[in-house]
Image (spheres, grey):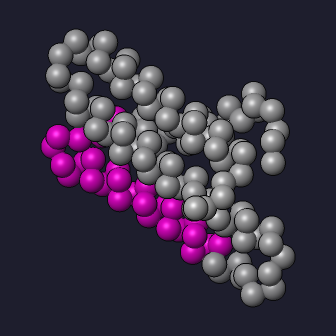
Amino acid sequence: MYKLSGTAKNMILVVCILVVVFIIASAIFYRSFAFLPFAVGAAMGGALNVLKIFLLNRAVERAASGDPTVTSSGFLGAYFLRFLLTAAVLFLAVIVPFISLWGAVAGVLTLPLSAYSMHFFPHQD
């Protein structure tokens, strides 16, 4: 099992809560099964952000380990991997007709919202 920091756990919790709130708001807005494309896009964006939090946590732990074999090019590669994953999810939302682009964008934007909300959680690491 991979050990996550307390901040990463809190960020994952906030991402999940925000995705559920977005999906419920969409269901209330549409009042039919027409909310499903938005829900699929939001779920995809939220799942991507959970994966990105895992990747970011791993990169931070590698940097904090003090290992001299860790190079800055590895961190740059991890950054571009996270960027390309985001681009792939948004591209998939554009191409597949059953996935709402706006839902995917809402899901992708849960990561910065969860990062900003960490101010309200007690520091626990």
Tell me where residue 45 appears, x and y as whole percent.
40, 44
Q: Is residue 122 left or right of residue 77?
A: right
Q: Is residue 118 left or right of residue 68?
A: left
Residue 68 position in % (x across, y down):
81, 85
Quadrant housing residue 25: top left
Residue 125 image point, x, y percent = 81, 48
Residue at position x 75%, y 87% in the image: 69
Give the magenta range.
Answer: 75-104
Q: Is residue 88 magenta?
A: yes
Whether residue 64 is situated above or below residue 94 in the rendered picture: below
Residue drawn at the location 66% of the way across and 54% of the way down: 4
Does the image show residue 4?
yes
Question: Is 11 located above or below residue 62 in the figure?
Answer: above
Judged from this view, the residue extending furthest toward the bottom is 69
Quadrant of the image occupied by residue 9: top right
Residue placed most toward the observer, 55 or 99 = 55
Our reading of the magenta stretch's main secondary structure is helix
Residue sitting at x 84%, y 76%: 66
Residue 23 figure quarter: top left
The reply, left or right, for residue 16 in relation to residue 29 is right
Considering every residue shown, the one lying at the far front of the view is 1
- Number of numbered tags placed on the structure image: 0
Is residue 105 visible from the viewing direction of this image?
A: no
Answer whether residue 69 is magenta in the image: no
Quadrant location of the N terminus in the rendered image: bottom right
Position of residue 13 measured from the top left corner of the image (x, y, whole percent):
57, 36
